[in-house]
Amino acid sequence: MCPIKLERVAINVPDLDEAMRMFESIGINFGAVREVQQPGGTTARVALSRLGVELFETSTAATEVSVRSFHLRVDDVDRAAEEVAKKGGKLITRFAVGKMEEAICSFYGLRIVFVSYPGSDPVAAFVEG
């Protein structure tokens, strides 16, 4: 496994609309907002920017802003998850949003999300489906 690039940083926020307004006030615009199902059945609203900032609001709303995870783009999410498992990590779940494949892993006390998608536009891959 060789990561292609740092794709994005996901941030837990208590209010997605307020967080979007705050980030947009400093020039970070969000091209898509989606509602996604999480493992365990809870839902989340997610906004993604082309700069690599992802805002994440769960139905069990966070009370504080915090870093949720960092995402690495790879060619093959299954192979990346297998490599992490060989080195002591753990696959938490695997799923797709739009045309974006994701494998969420726990490694060294951190949440790493491996992502793969066609083309070069993560927002388009996130929205299509």
Image: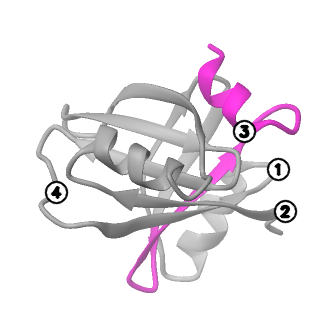
- Disc 3 element: helix
In the rendered structure, the answer to whether residue 78 lies left or right of residue 69 reads: right
Which of discs 1 and 2 lies nearer the camera? The answer is 2
Disc number for residue 75: 1
82 vs 88: above or below: above
The circle drawn on residue 50 is: none
Give the foreground label among 2 and 4: 4
Q: Earlier in the sequence, mark 2 or mark 4?
A: 2
C-beta proximity under 8 Å, tags 4 and 1: no
Closer-to-camera residue (61/16): 16
Marked residue nearer the N-terminal end (3 or 2): 2
Amino acid marked by disc 2? Ile
- The amino acid marked with disc number 4 is Ala
Disc 3 target residue: 122
Q: Which mark is residue 4?
A: 2
Residue 6 in picture, x, y percent from top left: 72, 66
Mark 1 and mark 2 lie on one chain; the one further toward the N terminus is 2
- Element on which disc 2 rests: loop
Whether the residues at callouts 1 and 2 have beta carbons within 8 Å, the answer is yes
| Mark 4, other Cα within 10 Å: few <14 / some 14–19 / many ≥20 | some
- The kind of residue tagged 1 is Asp
Measured Cα–Cα span from mark 3 to mark 4: 25 Å
- Segment colored magenta: 106-129
Q: Quadrant of the N terminus?
A: bottom right
Residue assigned mark 4: 62
Spatial distance from mark 1 to mark 3, Cα to Cα?
14 Å
Q: Are marks 3 and 4 in contact (CB under 8 Å)?
A: no
Spatial CA distance of label 1 from label 2 is: 8 Å
